[in-house]
Image (tube, helix red, strand yellow):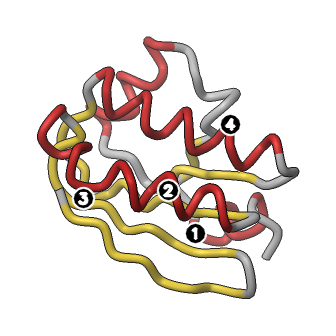
Amino acid sequence: MEMKIEPLAPGIVKAVLTGRMDVRGTDQIDVQFNAIAGSHSGMIVDMQGVEFLSSIGIRVLVLGAKTMQRRGGNLVLLSPQPEVMNVLEVVGILDILPAVSDPDEAARLVGL
């Protein structure tokens, strides 16, 4: 799994994820992802390149979202693949991890 970080505004970043969010993939990004969630007020997570999401991947996303929410920030998922979106819907965590397909809507939700 790859993660590229793009600064959008002071305190707000976009994380572009590519690959599989399984045990191996999340192990490659977990520390950096949590550090970013802990040090920013808003994060858009571009999920377009994520082809698989397992429970450990969900855990990383939820922990990041909760870290940001405790400090008044927001984490928003952008453009998850249909299979990934289905997993998020089945698990029922879209209230914690809002997912949108419109970049402008994602920007609005993180305060841009």
- The mark that comes first in sequence, 1 or 2, is 2
Q: Looking at the figure, which quarter contains the N terminus?
A: bottom left
Q: Which residue is mark 1?
A: 103
Q: How many marks?
A: 4
- The mark that comes first in sequence, 4 or 2, is 4
Kind of residue at badge 1:
Pro
Q: Residue 65's image quarter?
A: top right
Q: Which residue is mark 2?
A: 78
Kind of residue at badge 3:
Gly
Q: Is residue 55 left or right of residue 24?
A: right
| Residue sitting nearer the eye, 44 or 73 | 73
Is the residue marked by circle 1 packed among few (<14), some (14-19), or many (20+) residues within 10 Å? Answer: some
Name the residue: 69% across, 67% down.
40
Name of the residue lying farthest toward the right: 72
Q: Looking at the figure, which quarter contains the C terminus?
A: bottom right
> In this rendering, is residue 98 above or below 2?
above
Is the residue marked by circle 3 packed among few (<14), some (14-19), or many (20+) residues within 10 Å? Answer: some
Between the C-alphas of marks 4 and 2, the distance is: 17 Å
**Residue 49 shows which numbered tag?**
3
Name the residue: 87% across, 51% down.
72
The local secondary structure at tag 2 comes to strand
The local secondary structure at tag 4 comes to helix
> In this rendering, is residue 101 above or below 61?
below
Q: Which residue is mark 4?
A: 66
Contact? badges 4 and 3 (CB < 8 Å): no
> In this rendering, is residue 74 above or below 106?
above
Contact? badges 1 and 2 (CB < 8 Å): yes
Is the residue marked by circle 4 packed among few (<14), some (14-19), or many (20+) residues within 10 Å? Answer: some
Kind of residue at badge 2:
Leu
- The mark that comes first in sequence, 4 or 3, is 3
